[in-house]
Image: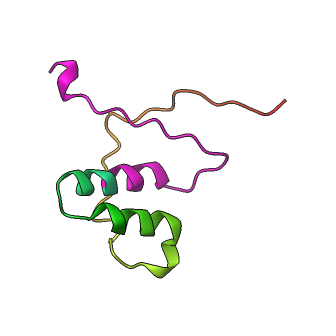
Amino acid sequence: MTDEHLILFRVTASHFLWKMVRRVVGSLVEVGRGNVRVEDFAQLIEQPKSVSLLEPARVTAPPSGLFLERITYPD
């Protein structure tokens, strides 16, 4: 496999929830496949409680290929 088949997601946050990154990545893959509209994904991120658009387990990305790059702490 070459770099042209590589998709890199870099997620930065002050806190993370269990499987949060895997669900965000899985949802973005569904957007890329055309199964979810960009507007629906944006609403899911901005108002997660108001949207039952996606079943989280259905779109959770597999853990393979995901790794923790860095942890930073405030001074």
| Magenta run includes residue 19 | yes
Reply above or below: 6 against 61.
above
- The structure residue drawn at horizontal position 33% and vertical position 72%, both measured from the top left corner, is 55
Instruction: From the top left corner, tell me how far across and down residue 4 is, in percent.
Output: 19, 23
Of residues 16 and 28, the one drawn nearer to the viewer in this rendering = 28
- The structure residue drawn at horizontal position 44% and vertical position 69%, both measured from the top left corner, is 43
Instruction: From the top left corner, tell me how far across and down residue 70 is, in percent.
Output: 58, 27
User: How many numbered markers are drawn?
Assistant: 0
Reply above or below: 52 against 69.
below
View extreme (top): residue: 2
Instruction: From the top left corner, tell me how far across and down residue 19 is, in percent.
Output: 46, 54
SS assignment for the magenta stretch, majority: loop
Q: Is residue 7 left or right of residue 44?
A: left
Of residues 19 and 31, the one drawn nearer to the viewer in this rendering = 31
Query: How are the residues colored?
Result: rainbow
Reply above or below: 56 against 6.
below
View extreme (right): residue: 75
The quadrant of the rendering that contains the C terminus is top right
The quadrant of the rendering that contains the N terminus is top left
Reply above or below: 28 against 57.
above
- The structure residue drawn at horizontal position 26% and vertical position 56%, both measured from the top left corner, is 31
- The structure residue drawn at horizontal position 52% and vertical position 66%, both measured from the top left corner, is 46
Bounds of the magenta span? 1-26
